[in-house]
Amino acid sequence: MQTYSMAAAPGLPAFSERLLAWFDVHGRHNLPWQHPRTAYRVWVSEVMLQQTQVVTVIDYFNRFMARFPKLDDLAAAPLDDVLALWSGLGYYARARNLHAAARVMAAQGIPDTLAHWLALPGVGASTAAAIMAQAFDAPATILDGNVKRVMARHAGIETPIEQAATIQALYYVAKRHTPSTRLADYTQAIMDLGATVCTRSQANCAGCPVSQDCVARVTDQVALLPARRARKPIPTRQAVFLQLEDDAGRFMLIRRPPSGIWGGLWCLPECPSKAFDEHAPSRSLGSVAAREAMLSQWSFTAKSDALQVAAFEHRFTHYQLRARIERVCVATGDNRQDNQDIRWFYHDELPHALPGLGLPQPIARFLIEYAAGKGG
Ligand code: SF4
């Protein structure tokens, strides 16, 4: 079993002391959620920062706080408003969980223990620890992707980072380095070190405050750690989205089911599709029977063949989506009605409507380009 040397070399200050001294000079002290650093603001920022970099999160956070300055504002808002402000940030389950957790907290109060944070939707161990440390200055140890990388390198942990035993070892090391004071600063400092110095592809060891006793640096393994299992190629899923256009030139958006990809977002209807050949001509891509079955649920009839008008690829965590958008002119009769799951738009309404709707980014991009092409 691999063992880890935790004590600093003789004469070297503790890991946390060196890190905090570096943080005081080089750390990030002006992130919007630090001023003021309330539990509500820290929680929102930590959920946004799951899977997303600080530089991307800042604008989303500021817009979010302008619209929902207090927990009660978020809890009272419709989910649609939350999804609209989340649009483009991805991983929309985070927004749904944030909204659900806000409603729990509005009723029960904001937690002040790790266990109570962990009981909320969308709050895992590292997020709960980050909130406790940053909002309450409590002794909690975070282990997000940045911290895992720093710990694996500094302690020279060579086993694949996906293994449970490796995570345990990383947590052990991270906990041993966590000081008993300045928890909020230390937590920000270790995240900053991982994000700005000990980066994935270009670690700046010369500028690192804990380089003297870093095993990866000394043994020339920085580029090799953290070790990962060989990755399997991710599968590709194919999809066809329909731009259904009525006689007046309106098109239909529907709300997607609450779970699954883009859950709860507004989108062009997705038609069950047979696999298509990406090199095939642009007509007749989905199954005609599936399309007709789909139209019949709203009592629409097709007035034209399906015509491909766009194609895009989108990467999800577990697969690559390869999608086409097909336009079909439809006769709607008296069946074209807005309700909570269906909305019709003229193209020139889009620039005003889109900011208030949560749409998947590739679909929003297509609609904006389409509206611009129409002079909308
Ligand atoms: S010395 Fe290099 S590899 Fe080690 S923790 Fe610092 S930046 Fe990372």
Image (spheres, grey):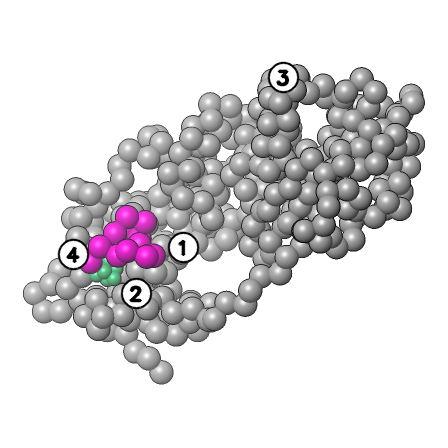
x then y, percent, for residue 25? 16, 42
Q: Disc 3 versus disc 1: distance between alpha carbons?
A: 44 Å
Nearer to us: label 3 or label 4: 3
Q: Is mark 4 on a helix, strand or loop?
A: helix
Q: Magenta stretch? A: 193-206
Q: How far apart are marks 3 and 2 (CA)?
A: 50 Å
Q: In this view, does 107 lie above or below 336?
A: below
Rendering quarter of residue 249? top right
Mark 1 and mark 4: Cα distance apart in space: 24 Å
Q: Which residue is drawn at 51% across and 39% down?
A: 89
- Of the two numbered discs 2 and 1 on the same chain, state the one appearing first in sequence: 1
Question: Which residue is the site of mark 1?
Answer: 144
Could you classify mark 3 by the number of other residues whose Cα lies within 10 Å: few (under 14), some (14-19), or many (20 or more)? Answer: some
Q: How crowded is mark 1: few (under 14 residues within 10 Å), some or many (20 or more)?
A: some
Q: How far apart are marks 3 and 4 (CA)?
A: 53 Å
Q: Residue 376 carries which label?
A: 3
